[in-house]
Amino acid sequence: MKNYILVGCLAALALMGCKKYLDAKPDKALATLATLVDMQALLDDNLRLNTQTVYAAEVAADDYYLKDAAMAAISPEGDKRIYNWEKGNQFEGAGDGWYYTYSPVYYGNVVLENIINLKRDAGNAKEWDNIKGQAYFYKGIAMLFGAAVWAPAYDEATAKNTLGLPIRASSDFNVVSKRASVAETYGQLLSDLKQAAQLLPVSQVHVMRPSKIAAYAIISRAYLMMNKYQEAGLYADSALKLNNVLVDYNDLNTAAANAFTAYKGEVLAHFSIANPAILSQSNAVVVPELYQLYQPDDLRKNIFYKSVGTNLYAFKGSYSGGNALFFGPAVDEMYLNRAECYARLNKLSEALNDLNNLMRKRWNKNKVYVPYASSDKEQVINDILLERRKELLMRGLRWGDLKRLNKLGYNLTVKRSYNANQAVLLPNDSRYVMSLPEAVLENSGMQQNP
């Protein structure tokens, strides 16, 4: 009972502090964790640490659209503004992305500040390392989710001089937040994730707890967002060496409301979102050009989609096993990460091997699968990017992909229509970097994004 009370107190404290945007002064007594059991109990607060991931990047991405009637009924208003790429007042009311980002950071800091007061010895070393590793992981992944929303695409030439996120290294709310550079933001989150990878066990009792494999996978994701292919490929390979098992979609029920089982299959660590109305199956319609990319014998066409009208389809293929969208790392993402990195590093045979191994598990076994094959580097890269979009939709990744690919010169222009008005998002537009919540600026004095 003590542990539940402790978690409840700290959860309330985190809620108070983050909702006041890191300026409240907490009762230090509440933030004192006496045992490793206390610390693990705090990190097992799955509601706040695993199932309330910031979802703004998915709202802004181009894999879906809203019909006018659905758009008119959407709440909160900020989600509408994000959808239409309108700056300002994007995070007012429900769906507070800033809280979803900095609550895990706060939890991680509380654990890291308290665990040093407990002696690490032969009897508790594994548990001590595991808990410390989890704390670092939650900080790192939360910052990566936040960077996709509030930081520009990583550019080595400008990263040191461009504003990123505030780095919270302490649980003390009296420390005023200041924005770090993009280079410092990525440097810190990678440092946290790498420390997590060193400390965490290969596997956990449940995928709600992050593991070494999950840490490798998220490091790979971070490096790919930075267009650093050597590093992204290395960490994807490290993850796949520990778990490379793909689900054969032939074994799934294509007619099921959701063909996947929660916490199973290719999931390396479970992270999902709070299922906002704007991304629900009743409102979000998959863009026709994406649905039409799937060939008839591609099992994903039935496993990922359900009909919601004449030639209208909604996504039903979340690895969460339900309606909540899955944003965590998974085996399929690592195959695609490694394949892209191989291709960009001129290892075309290895790239195609990864791509075709994935596709064979997605193809109707009673039909002939014709493998991808090419000796042209750009063609192989484009094939991988095509399958990446078809495989990883509604995973919180597309927005980051648009940013990094446009930085490379892919010139992807995105358009949306609402009430006969068209919104256009040009490559490298400043609107790819969302507005910080106005309340954050008022309380901290931080500079707003342009």
Image: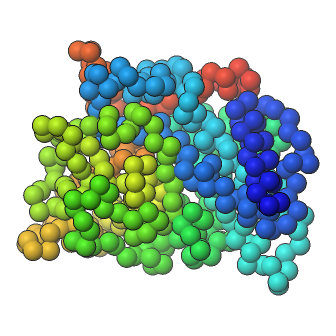
Q: Quadrant of residue 181?
A: top right
**Residue lying at 81% horizontally and 54% vertically, measured from the top left:** 6
**Residue lying at 22% horizontally and 48% vertically, measured from the top left:** 306
Along the viewing direction, whichever of 311 and 389 lies nearer the viewer? 311
Left or right: 87 as drawn, with respect to 291? right
Along the viewing direction, whichever of 383 and 246 lies nearer the viewer? 246
Q: Quadrant of residue 28?
A: top right
Along the viewing direction, whichever of 225 and 80 lies nearer the viewer? 80
Left or right: 14 as drawn, with respect to 428? right
Left or right: 339 as drawn, with respect to 328? left
Question: Can you see residue 24?
Answer: yes
**Residue lying at 21% horizontally and 59% vertically, measured from the top left:** 255
Above or below for 54 versus 353: above
Residue 103 x, y percent position in the rendering: 67, 44
Residue 18 x, y percent position in the rendering: 71, 36
Q: How many marks?
A: 0
Residue 43 x, y percent position in the rendering: 69, 59
Question: Can you see residue 449?
Answer: no
Residue furthest front in the image: 1
Along the viewing direction, whichever of 330 and 11 lies nearer the viewer? 11
Quarter that holds the N terminus: bottom right
**Residue lying at 52% horizontally and 63% vertically, measured from the top left:** 269
